[in-house]
Image (cartoon, rainbow, N blue to C red):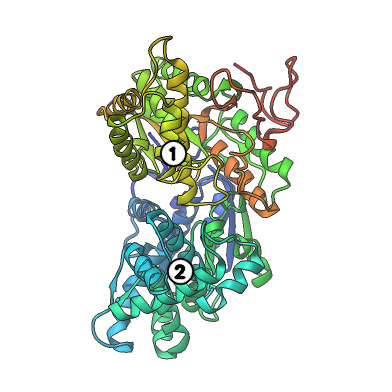
Amino acid sequence: MSASTNSDSAPGLPGAVPGAPDLPDAILDALDPEQREVATALHGPVVVLAGAGTGKTRAITHRIAYGVRAGVYKPTAVLAVTFTARAAGELRTRLRELGVAGVQARTFHAAALRQLGYFWPRVIGGAPNRIVEHKAQLVAEAARLVGVSVDRVAVRDLASEIEWAKVSLVGPEDYERRALADGRPAPAGFDHHQVARLATAYEDVKSERGVIDFEDVLQILAGILAENRAIAEEVRAQYRHFVVDEYQDVSPLQQFLLDQWLGDRTELCVVGDPSQTIYSFAGATPRYLLGFRRRFPAAQEVRLVRDYRSTPQVVGVANEVLRRGRVTGALELRAQRPPGPPVSFVAYDDDDAEAAGVAAKAGRLIATGTRPSEIAVLYRTNAQSEAFEAALADAGIGYQVRGGERFFQRKEVRDAVVLLRGAARSADPDQPMPEQVRDVLTSVGWSPDPLAARGAARERWDAMAALVALADDLARASRPGAQATVASLVAELEERAAAQHAPTVEGVTLASLHAAKGLEWDAVFLAGMSEGLMPISLAETDAAVAEERRLLYVGVTRARVHLEVSFARSRTPGGRATRKRTRFLDGLWPEPGGGRRPGPSGPAPATC
């Protein structure tokens, strides 16, 4: 099973339900005691705190199936919502396997869009406005209206900021005050006042064109339900029981819509893990999950802590990462799998050595029977993928990049290669090649110092910095009397690009930690775990650092059996060893001399 979202079939979990059972109680036979408690809690409010790998999807689908089979739920009166189409599809598949049809399992947006399309003609009149899938053109036009100069990267960052404001229920007129109060930096190159003006112009452009965006779908529907009692009652008569998965990721806008669906009722079951809140930058907040029992004092709470995904060694590290950070609401997992190999902690000399070492170990795993698709290399930023792409290609190991474009397919990299190709034809033979490369790349976003920004602008800088580093490496590696040139750099880039395009059927997954959420593999390499990357240097507040720790926890809990955590002391071969491992591994990383890691579970980790 490769990169699966399904940890319920891991060794040790009670067996799957054979077919569609006729008796309600037969559905419960597939569950452990805590999962059964969830399944039999048929009336809300219910909050399920479910740790990684504990079978939460099994628990909530069996709850719905049990409720339907017991005659408590009418299938068409149940609405289960989650955050991705993949997760919604998994809910529907599980329910079909349990013999339950008619339950609506959708993303927030899909459920809202269906209802909005139904009520729009009655409330607003005419056909619904067209939904724009991408904001780029509208943001660019809004920027022109307010006299702001933008490029492609700025448009992406501004679009993301507009989305954050809308899902956070922050209107353009209140954006500047709220962002400053929250300590939220404006996108690179802009101030909060400019963003507020642009957000106002963005809404004007949409109105003039007669279009809406995805956030509007939720806002408009929630507004209709809040203001039109007859329509609200119609929806509430249709849907009487609600289930919300991944509740730690709900935004204020989604919560507002959920409140309109519910009205004054309490038939709500929410499922989440505050330790896996990693999207605060996009408006997600765990406060609704953590505050559920304050809002509903009579709520039943169930905790799922039996981890069926990972070995005791992996679970032990995951628990320690949270415990040492005193993470709010953290659940202590209890491993259900038999023991596996120790977790490895490795300090490499430089980035190239780290990439080569990871590729070599992946190769050994493949040689001993692990499928390439059951191996993942996870890192903090998409720009880190290039070194691992090159190392795996050199080792003849197929790979796939998830959650981001391949390095050489990124527009900024393609544009840079075109410029370098042109520069190669007119290069000054007396100017060192690395200097020429820096001159060229300055025009497409590179600067000597890292950008103090987040989002696409920083990713572009990281990509350009990788090209600069490659130029430096090529110059250092050139033989005496054979000076490296821009032309030789372009040839190297073209060879690397060609190698990564080789077709693969089975491939090692390369992914950022954010893109790995919800997935799992037999073997995981957590690479680049050094200060400045984990936590990332842009995490300047306590809240931001705490989120970075949760992100590391998500990475650790993606591994079923094999886990290696590594970092490189230096960026380049022979460079100064100035990097330090992440503070999040204090007390976990083995000390010189073979000291054992303190902690309640699992044998001492090994270094290699």
Where is residue 551, by image quadrant?
top right
Task: Report which residue position mark 2 lands on.
Answer: 72
Using the numbered discs, state the Cα–Cα distance from disc 1 to disc 2 in whole angstroms: 59 Å
Between 233 and 278, the one lying in front of the other is 278
Q: Secondary structure at mark 1?
A: helix
Q: Is residue 588 above or below residue 270?
A: above
Nearer to us of marks 1 and 2 is 1
Q: Residue at x 47, y 29 (%)?
A: 469
Task: Report which residue position mark 1 lands on.
Answer: 464
The answer to whether mark 1 and mark 2 are in CB contact below 8 A is no
Q: Is residue 527 above or below residue 410?
A: above
Q: Residue at x 67, y 39 (%)?
A: 321
Residue 326 left/right relative to 246: right
Q: Position of residue 372 (x, y in %)?
A: 37, 26
Q: Is residue 297 visible?
A: no
- Image quarter where the N terminus lies is top left
Structural crowding at the residue carrying mark 1, measured as other residues with C-alpha within 10 Å and reported as few (<14), some (14–19) or many (≥20): many
Residue 560 left/right relative to 319: left
Q: Position of residue 305 (x, y in %)?
A: 61, 45
- Image quarter where the C terminus lies is top right
Q: Secondary structure at mark 2?
A: loop
